[in-house]
């Protein structure tokens, strides 16, 4: 199922570009968390990322985003970390992946693009993936795409 | 939510400057939001503006609108829009205003008198972040501490 008008909004969000093999995504996510923690920041999560590269490419390019507790931010330029006090994207098509993430993420990715084309919409953002947890601690992923 | 000390930081912003009547503050929002981006560069934050009051006519002032975007862009010099690598208010007083009617000047006065009472010196230029909630705007107003605004 795809819903329209989804939005992603967080305060104090740091981000960094990563290239990695899709199966090694956890290493990249952990690396970013470590960079921020090592510099004394306190990630509050949830972590999310955009898929910038072609989904069939061997090496994946992604921008990883992580909200932190601090409103004041500075890191040495060579860490190449961006920051914004407010992160906000709206008009997203969105769908959920409950289990079997590896196989389902490919299916859902194309479902978003098919839906966009069927409804004559234009792509405005890359695909966002957000990992979330329910109150009963069940994890799931939300995949969304900004359109107009 | 009272008045608190905060930073305001955005990497990668488009800016648009105009001298206009205070009451026309919404005009620049449409201008900058209509700026067409492509799917590789997208808007990823709320529109904000700074207001620098005109010293001789209080109805007028210089507005600079900012649109946070996902990555740097190169724009030609002739354009009204400019790209700025970052906007940084190192330390500022923040007040959230959720009144029925948008009155950022009244909000600024509130921060100003708070600053006076606490012997804090603030800048004349202030910043309004426009947060859309159910089709209406809430304003987060930032007034930089003297010497700690954007350079």
Image (cartoon, rainbow, N blue to C red):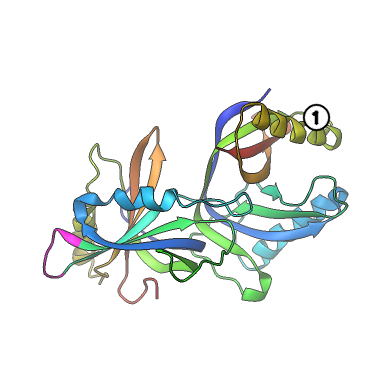
**Residue at the limit of the structure toward the front, as seen here:** B78
Question: Residue B85: where, in percent of width, then height?
Answer: 52, 69
**Disc 1 crowd, CA 10 A, few/some/many (<14, 14-19, 20+):** few
**Residue extent of the magenta highlight:** B55-60
Question: Residue A46: where, in percent of width, then height?
Answer: 64, 45
Q: Residue at x 11, y 69 (%)?
A: B56
The answer to which image quadrant residue A111 occupies is: top right
Is residue B135 visible in the rendered structure shown here?
A: yes
SS at circle 1: loop
Which quadrant, please, contains the C terminus of chain B? bottom left
Task: Give B136 or A147, whichever is nearer the viewer.
Answer: A147
Q: Which residue is mark 1?
A: A99
* Residue B93: in magenta span: no
* Residue B56: in magenta span: yes
The answer to which image quadrant residue A76 occupies is: bottom right
Above or below: residue A54 compared with residue B19:
above
Q: Residue at x 19, y 66 (%)?
A: B116
Left or right of A8 on screen, residue B137? left
Question: In the rendered structure, the residue with mark 1 lies on which chain?
Answer: A
Left or right of A14 on screen, residue A1? right
The answer to which image quadrant residue B114 occupies is: bottom left
Q: Residue at x 78, y 56 (%)?
A: A28
């Amino acid at each position: 199922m795809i819903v329209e008008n989804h939005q992603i909004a967080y305060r104090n969000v740091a981000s960094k570009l990563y290239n990695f093999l899709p199966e090694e995504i956890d290493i990249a996510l952990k690396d970013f968390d470590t960079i921020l923690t090592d510099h004394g920041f306190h990630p509050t999560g949830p972590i999310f990322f955009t898929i910038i590269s072609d989904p069939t490419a061997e090496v994946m390019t992604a921008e990883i985003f992580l909200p932190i507790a601090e409103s004041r931010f500075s890191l040495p330029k060579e860490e190449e970390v961006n920051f914004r006090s407010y992160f906000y994207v709206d008009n997203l098509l969105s769908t959920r992946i409950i289990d079997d993430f590896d196989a389902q993420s490919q299916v859902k990715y194309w479902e978003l693009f098919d839906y966009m084309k069927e409804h004559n919409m234009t792509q405005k953002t890359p695909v966002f993936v957000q990992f979330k947890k329910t109150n009963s601690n069940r994890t799931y992923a939300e995949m969304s795409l900004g359109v107009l | 939510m009272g008045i608190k000390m905060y930073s305001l930081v955005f990497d990668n912003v488009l800016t648009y400057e105009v001298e206009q009547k205070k009451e026309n503050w919404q005009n620049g929002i449409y201008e900058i939001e209509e700026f067409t981006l492509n799917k590789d560069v997208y808007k990823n934050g709320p529109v904000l503006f700074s207001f620098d009051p005109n010293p001789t006519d209080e109805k007028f002032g210089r507005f600079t609108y900012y649109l946070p975007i996902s990555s740097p862009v190169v724009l030609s010099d002739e354009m009204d829009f400019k790209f700025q690598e970052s906007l940084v208010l190192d330390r500022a007083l923040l007040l959230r205003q959720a009144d029925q009617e948008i009155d950022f000047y009244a909000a600024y006065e509130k921060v100003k008198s708070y600053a006076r009472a606490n012997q804090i010196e603030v800048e004349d230029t202030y910043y309004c972040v426009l947060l859309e909630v159910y089709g209406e705007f809430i304003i987060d107003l930032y007034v930089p501490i003297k010497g700690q605004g954007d350079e």
